[in-house]
Image (cartoon, helix red, strand yellow):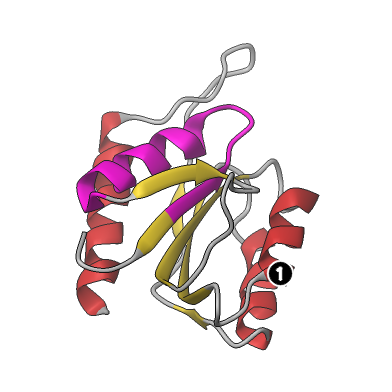
Amino acid sequence: MKFKMRILHYSPAGNAEALANSIARSQQANADKIPPAYPCENEKLLFIGVELKGSSVHKNVSDFCKDLNPNRSKNVAFFVVGGDASGVEELKKTVTANGLAVVGDTHVCAAKGGFLKKAKISDADVTAAVAWASKIVDSL
C-alpha cells in the first residue's frame, strides 16, 4: 500500500464485493462493506463500489456518502457493477459538496447474466477494475 486507503462496497449479489476484494489485494489494502465495521479516518483515498439495478443507489450508500468529510477521506473513486452509472452522479455531487475530491472516471462493469441466470463478473472485468484502480492510485 502506497498510502492509507480503503475499498468499500455495497454488494447484494456479491459482484461489487468480488471487485473490491481484488482491488484490495492488488493495493494491499482493506476491503469492507458499506457501512464499514470501522469508520473511515484520515484516508487519502476511498474506493466505493456499488451494485445497481437501474440507476437507484441504496440508501446505505447515500447515507454513508453524506457523512463523508475531509477528516474521513481526501479523495473518492467510484466503481459500479450493473445498472446505470448515472446513479452515482448524485453521490459524486454529495462528496464534492462535503469537500472531498472525486478522482478518475467511474469504472463501470456490466455483469453478464441471463433471464434466469444470476449476473456474474468475468476475469476480464476483474482485471480491468484492478488496472483502473492502479491508475488512480498512481495518479495521487
Q: Which residues are magenta?
A: 7-28
Between 114 and 14, the one lying in front of the other is 14
In this rendering, position of residue 60 left or right of residue 27: right
Say above or below: 68 vs 84: below
Label 1 crowd (10 A; few <14 / some 14-19 / many >=20):
few
SS at circle 1: helix
Q: Point out residue 96 in the picture as x, y percentages from the top left corner.
A: 61, 83
Residue at the (73%, 70%) spot, across then down? 66
41 to 38, vertically: above or below: below
Q: Say if residue 21 shows up in the picture.
A: yes
Is residue 10 within the magenta segment? yes
Q: In the displayed image of the protein, which residue is found farthest to the top? A: 116
Identify the residue at horizontal 50%, vertical 43% (top origin).
Answer: 32
| Residue beneath disc 1 | 67
**What residue appears at the point 54 percent right and 46 percent down from the top-left corner?**
9
Where residue 121 appears, x then y in whole percent?
41, 31
